[in-house]
Amino acid sequence: MRAVLQRAQRASVHVNGELISSFDSQGILAFVGVTHEDTQNDVDTVVRKIAELRILDNEKSVTDLSAPVIVVSQFTLYADVKKGRRPSWNNAAKPEVAESLVHAVVEGLRARGLDVGTGVFGADMKVELVNDGPVTIIVDS
């Protein structure tokens, strides 16, 4: 499992012009990709990293500050671009597998008492953020 965490001052997700999730204070926008071998152990690792990494102001975590998180599924994190000009998506898990594991990440964060928004799995989303820093961290489980 791979997560790209972006510290943001604000972030939002729209689908078909409708606001799905947003926050207007410092938080984390987490893009999460799933590959074929991922299990609950990978979910647990990513949840722990999102919740506990001290990447917000004053070396605080989202847990320390009760900061918001938006989780967006992104299979393109497993693009293979080694050959040619067209990415291969062979390393990304099938949608039925990926959706349940991304949902498990969301539920794991909520179980920690965090305010967690989401995108819409498989939808054409418009994601906006004001990257703070910028701080972008890649987490591989």
Image (tube, rainbow, N blue to C red):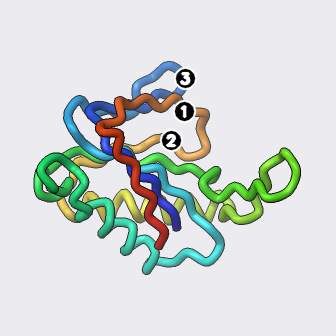
Residue at figure coordinates x 20%, y 53% from the top left: 62
Instruction: Assess whether mark 2 and mark 3 are in contact (beta carbons under 8 angstroms).
Output: no
Residue at figure coordinates x 61%, y 44% from the top left: 122
**Pointer 3 local density, CA inside 10 Å: few below 14, some 14–19, many at least 20:** few
Calculate the distance from the C-alpha at mark 3 to the C-alpha at mark 1.
8 Å
Residue 41 coordinates in the image, percent (x, y): 43, 80
Residue 100 coordinates in the image, percent (x, y): 51, 63
**Pointer 1 local density, CA inside 10 Å: few below 14, some 14–19, many at least 20:** some
Q: Quadrant of residue 132?
A: top left
Q: Quadrant of residue 38?
A: bottom right
Q: Is residue 126 left or right of residue 75?
A: left
Q: Amino acid at mark 1?
A: Met
Instruction: Assess whether mark 1 and mark 2 are in contact (beta carbons under 8 angstroms).
Output: yes
Q: Amino acid at mark 3?
A: Asn
- Residue in the foreground of this view, choosing between 12 and 49: 49
Mark 2 and mark 1 lie on one chain; the one further toward the N terminus is: 2
Above or below 25: residue 108: below
Q: Is residue 70 visible?
A: no
Q: Is residue 130 left or right of residue 61?
A: right
Mark 3 and mark 1 lie on one chain; the one further toward the N terminus is: 3
The residue to which callout 3 is attached is 16
Q: Is residue 135 visible?
A: yes
- Residue in the foreground of this view, choosing between 38 and 77: 77
Number of dots carrying numbers: 3
The residue sitting at the right extreme is 84
The residue to which callout 1 is attached is 125
Above or below 93: residue 128: above
Calculate the distance from the C-alpha at mark 3 to the C-alpha at mark 2.
11 Å
Q: Amino acid at mark 2?
A: Val
- Residue in the foreground of this view, choosing between 19 and 11: 11
